[in-house]
Amino acid sequence: MVTSRDPAGASAMATLSTAEQRATVLEGLPDDVTRGRLRFMVNDDAMASLSSSAARGALAANDVPTAQAALPECLHSFVRSNALYE
C-alpha cells in the first residue's frame, strides 16, 4: 500500500500531484519488485495525523505512551495481544 498526501501538507516533498507521486514511485521500482501489487490511495487529513514514524520514534526513545497515542485506538488491542511494544 502506498499512500500519498496533499503536497501542500508535506513540506519535505516536492510539489507533485498525487498522479505524479504515483508515477515517481513506479518509475523507481522495477517490475520484478512490484509485480503489480502496489495499491495507491490518497491519504486524507485524518489518516495523515496517524504517523508510524512518530510511533517508531517514540519506541526508539522507550516512550510507550507516546507511541500508543500515535496509533488509532482500534490498533491498541492488536499491539498488546502481539506484544509489539515489548
Image (cartoon, grey):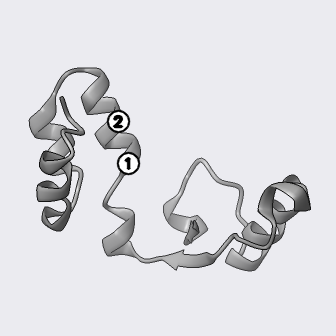
Vertical side of 72 occupied by 54: above or below? above
Toward the viewer: 14 or 44?
A: 44
Type of amino acid at the residue the image marks with label 2: Arg
Query: Dot 2 lies on which element?
Result: helix
Q: Position of residue 85 (x, y in %)?
A: 20, 35
Vertical side of 82 occupied by 38: above or below? below
Left or right of residue 7, residue 64 in this image: left
Q: Position of residue 35 (x, y in %)?
A: 81, 67
Q: Residue at x 25, y 20 (%)?
A: 61
Left or right of residue 66, residue 54 in this image: right
Type of amino acid at the residue the image marks with label 1: Ser
Q: Which mark is residue 56?
A: 2
Toward the viewer: 85 or 19?
A: 85
Mark 2 → mark 1, Cα distance in angstroms: 6 Å
Q: Residue at x 19, y 22 (%)?
A: 62
Left or right of residue 77, residue 85 in this image: right
Q: Position of residue 58 (x, y in %)?
A: 25, 31
Q: Report the quarter where the C terminus lies.
A: top left
Task: Check if mark 2's residue and mark 1's residue have beta carbons within 8 Å.
Answer: yes
Q: Position of residue 43 (x, y in %)?
A: 48, 73
Q: Report the quarter where the N terminus lies.
A: bottom right
Q: Quadrant of residue 2?
A: bottom right
Query: Dot 1, crowdedness within 10 Å: few (<14), some or many (≥20)?
Result: few
Toward the viewer: 10 or 33?
A: 33
Read off the residue under disc 1.
52
Tag count: 2
Query: Dot 1 lies on which element?
Result: helix
Query: Dot 2, crowdedness within 10 Å: few (<14), some or many (≥20)?
Result: some
